[in-house]
Amino acid sequence: MTHHQPRNTAPDTTRPAPEGEVVGLLLAAGGGRRLGGRPKALLPHRGRPLVEHAVGVLRAGGCARIHVVLGAESATVRARAELPGCVLVDNPDWAEGMGSSLRAGLESLAGTGADAALVSLVDQPGIGPEAVARVLAAHASSGSLVAAAYDGVRGHPVLFGADLWPGVAATATGDRGARAYLKERADTITLVECGDVARPYDIDTEADLVHLE
């Protein structure tokens, strides 16, 4: 891991997580290829970089500790975005796709004592704290593999218990992330309907920028 800017560094990133804690894992490494090469983390939303909004959603939803995986123009993201208390993880292989960022993020959680990782994507600003809170609540009662659903279709955030991380990392390739892993275990996923409180659109193209404020 590279040196952090002081304002972006957690007071002690090696502190063990409290027993049973779920750490938020924000994947924010994308280069915005269909957005003219603008890193998604730096897209403006409500006057600030989109990555700040995404971190705020995780915090408001109940994640006290957050790891953020950076990739495209990571040095610029560190300089421009206010991410106090977050653990910033550089993924030098970000151009390979979301799978590499998921692997880097899970690797950064090794040894933290976290019970689970709640994975969210920086380019889904329509998913707010309510969806995060519902997935966390389902984890407390239903086990180690939980995902938000929208009209019955699985989406993000997705929660993986620590016992599942090796399997997830082993199958996370290309832009598919954990899709193959989740497909194989469709019968064991606890789906939490969030379509009434969130919208799962992605910011992928110029046309999608209408969703940002």
Image (cartoon, rainbow, N blue to C red):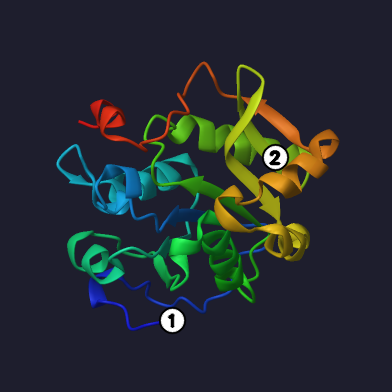
Amino acid type at circle 1 is Met
Q: Residue furthest right?
A: 187
Q: Nearer the viewer, residue 185 or 193?
A: 185
Q: Is residue 36 above or below residue 207?
A: below
Locate residue 153 relative to residue 69 in the image: left or right: right
Sequence order check: which comes first, mark 1 or mark 2? 1
Q: Position of residue 71 (x, y in %)?
A: 38, 65
Q: Position of residue 88 (x, y in %)?
A: 40, 69
Locate residue 189 relative to residue 68 in the image: left or right: right
Q: Is residue 22 above or below residue 84?
A: above
Q: Which residue is mark 1?
A: 1
Please tell me which residue is depicted at 48% across the width and 21% down the height of the picture.
197
Q: Position of residue 165 (x, y in %)?
A: 71, 62
Per the image, label 2 sits on a secondary structure element best described as strand
Mark identifier at residue 146: 2
Quadrant of the image for the N terminus? bottom left
Q: Nearer the viewer, residue 145 or 114?
A: 145
Locate residue 147 relative to residue 182 in the image: left or right: left
Would you say the residues marked 1 and 2 are in contact, meaning their CB atoms lie under 8 Å apart? no
Q: Quadrant of residue 76?
A: bottom left
Residue 24 showing in the rendered view: no
Mark identifier at residue 121: none
Q: Nearer the viewer, residue 184 or 55?
A: 184
Q: Quadrant of residue 203?
A: top left
Please tell me which residue is depicted at 75% across the width and 38% down the height of the picture.
141
Q: Residue furthest left?
A: 47
Real-space CA distance between mark 1 and mark 2, rounded to the nearest whole angstrom: 29 Å
